[in-house]
Image (cartoon, rainbow, N blue to C red):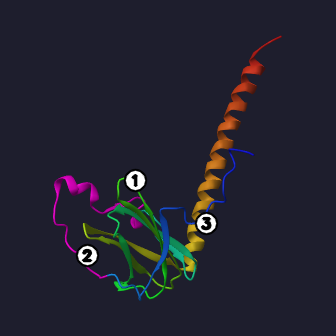
């Protein structure tokens, strides 16, 4: 009998939960305000990087993209996602994991496609307060995508041509120094 044998891992792991946030959620829009500060400050809600503003900002029309929002806070932590200042009507996954100090870590992610520039916000709410992260996602026109692609290709070509020129200069110097040497 092996002592190193382990049982199959379950998902989500023990101490975690996976849920769906949607329009049928019964959580209130506004959390109760935090009643105390000081020693309880470790219980406050905190958004963690990467913030929405650090994520996808330019996408192709109808191209799929993801946004992620994560935070720590009291066990009653929850997210509200908005698109153009309206609560999302679709189910948005959220995973929470209990931390050893009694707080919780929560992660939520959104998968979407858009046809026009759109503002997204992810608000994390709890009895200890709330925080919001926002981003404007710009839809790039096909012509703009082609121009950006050409600009990237041109920059790559210039870098390769510059490197080739440096190599040729090195060869020229080596050739000239060889022709000056007499045997």
Q: Are marks 1 and 3 in contact (CB under 8 Å)?
A: no
Q: Secondary structure at mark 1?
A: loop
Q: Earlier in the sequence, mark 2 or mark 3?
A: 2
Q: Pointer 2: what residue?
A: 31
> Position of 138 compared to 46: left or right?
right
- Tell me the magenta residue range: 28-53
Q: Pointer 1: what residue?
A: 100
Kindly report the distance in space between the C-alpha atoms of the residues bearing marks 1 and 3: 51 Å
Spot the residue most to the right.
183
Q: Is residue 3 magenta?
A: no
Q: Secondary structure at mark 3?
A: helix
Q: Residues within 10 Å of mark 2 (few under 14, many from 20)?
A: some
Residue at (25%, 79%) from the top-left corner? 30
> Position of 158 compared to 134: left or right?
right
Q: Earlier in the sequence, mark 1 or mark 3?
A: 1
Residue at (30%, 82%) from the top-left corner? 28
């Amino acid at each position: 009998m092996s002592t190193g044998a382990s049982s199959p891992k379950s998902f989500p792991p023990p101490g975690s939960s996976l849920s769906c946030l949607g329009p049928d959620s019964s959580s209130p829009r506004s959390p109760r305000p935090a009643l105390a500060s000081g020693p309880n400050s470790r219980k406050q809600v905190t958004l963690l990087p990467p913030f929405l503003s650090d994520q996808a900002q330019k996408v192709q029309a109808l191209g799929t993209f993801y946004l992620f929002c994560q935070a720590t806070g009291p066990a009653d932590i929850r997210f509200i996602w908005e698109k153009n200042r309206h609560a999302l009507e679709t189910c948005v996954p959220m995973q929470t994991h209990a931390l050893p100090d009694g707080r919780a870590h929560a992660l939520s992610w959104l998968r979407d496609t858009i046809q026009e520039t759109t503002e997204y916000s992810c608000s994390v709410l709890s009895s200890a307060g709330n925080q919001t992260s926002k981003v404007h996602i710009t839809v790039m026109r096909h012509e703009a995508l082609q121009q950006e692609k050409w600009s990237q290709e041109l920059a790559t070509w210039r870098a390769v041509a510059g490197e080739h020129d440096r190599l040729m200069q090195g060869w020229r110097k080596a050739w000239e120094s060889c022709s000056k040497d007499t045997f």
